[in-house]
Image (spheres, rainbow, N blue to C red):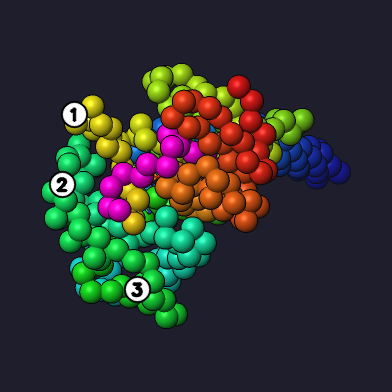
Amino acid sequence: MKAKPNLKIFAAVLLAAVLALLLFIGRRHTDYTYIEQNGFAMGTVVSQKLYGGTAEDAAAVADAVSDLEQLLSRHLDNSAVSALNRTGSSESAALAEIVTDCLDICTASGGAFDITVGALCDLWDFDGGGHLPDAADIAAALESVGYASVAIGGDAVTVGAGQKVDLGAAGKGAACDAARAYLEESGVRGAVVSVGGSVLVYGARNRAGDKWRVAIRHPRKNDEFLGVVTLASGCVSTSGDYEKFFEEDGVRYHHILDPKTGYPAESGLISVTVVCDSGLLSDALSTACFVLGKEQGAALVERFGAGAVFVDADLRITTVGNVEFSQ
Ligand code: ADP
Ligand code: MG
């Protein structure tokens, strides 16, 4: 008879534990608690808005972006891309995968997007403020440009003699893909992760599953928006002539180069936004379309089943394909 009260206490404690566990599990799966974190990687601001995530999740997303920077950055001596540019070859499965995806877009864009523009980028030095190079130096650097000399064999990537690979036009989008790979394994309900001009929207931010709204910067008015892209999930990347540029004798020289001429692209577009599932694709396509211009850019976007918002020099807006855009 003495054991009875003990049994009751035990049963009560067990019940309380089970209830607490159920409450915890329930919370984890219905809670949209919002946290925000900002950091810096890939030479730009990385901002996260997580719904139903923890500080550990935010740290893991930041790590995923930094890990990719360690692989892709030309400015880090021990990155796989730096090794590739130094020695002409690299053995990295992760790099081989990204270069393979990039080569598809190099081909599809007819070389408007070309990852071998590294020597040209060095010459213009937009990361260091930029300056107008001598025409002879541009002609010499152009000799090393040509994605057709890049080869993939298993995990190995090789480039032609003197070629310099620059993944600046696809890296931030690829970072969005890396962030999503983590989020899919986590308990995070919804997220917006922006890495410079590439934005990932993932999952849901509330029980209603409302669509996400991503604002696009006005290409000529700092701190103003041009409009909003609405989407359920995916990536939104913008390439513009206002990101990195300098002016000389009234001419604007910006960081998106035409691999055919070696000079900043002059296609009549000043901002291109591309929307699709893949971050790498949206980033690379936005650069490619910027170089190609409205007509050929539209054909490229349609070919990949993506959507786009083009802005021309008169601030005229054209939407293409699968995109919901409002002003
Ligand atoms: P951002 O880096 O501002 O997001 P982009 O995605 O358009 O803009 O990438 C521009 C960067 O890509 C340049 O800074 C340079 O490193 C590289 N780049 C420039 N022109 C090209 C091109 N035609 N093809 C591939 N990469 C390019
Ligand atoms: Mg890009």
Q: How crowded is the residue under tag 3: few (<14 C-alpha within 10 Å), some, or many (20+)? A: few
Q: Nearer the viewer, residue 88 or 77?
A: 88
Q: x%, y% of residue 31?
A: 68, 33
- Is ligand 1 closer than 8 angstroms to the Cβ of mark 3? no
Q: In the displayed structure, does residue 211 sit left or right of residue 12? A: left
Contact? badges 3 and 2 (CB < 8 Å) = no
**The one of 18 and 271 positioned closer to us in this rendering:** 271
Q: Dot 1 surroundings within 10 Å: few (below 14), some, or many (20 or more)?
A: few
According to the image, label 2 marks what residue? 133
Q: Kindly identify which residue carries mark 1.
A: 249
On the question of residue 206 being in view, the answer is: yes
Real-space Cα separation, disc 1 to disc 3, in angstroms = 37 Å
The residue sitting at 64% across, 25% down in the picture is 326
Which element type, helix, strand or loop, lies under badge 2? loop
Label 3 vs 2, first from the N-terminus: 2
Along the polypeptide, which appears first: circle 1 or circle 3?
3
- Residue drawn at (27%, 37%), measured in percent from left and top? 253
- The answer to whether one can see residue 197 in this image is no
**Identity of the residue furthest to the right in this view:** 1
- Amino acid at the residue labelled 1: Asp
In the rendered image, residue 262 lying in the magenta stretch gets the answer yes
Q: Which residue is mark 3?
A: 149
Distance from the alpha carbon under mark 3 to that under mark 2? 25 Å
The mark total stands at 3
Q: Amino acid at mark 2?
A: Pro
Please state the extent of the stretch shown in magenta in the rendering: 261-276
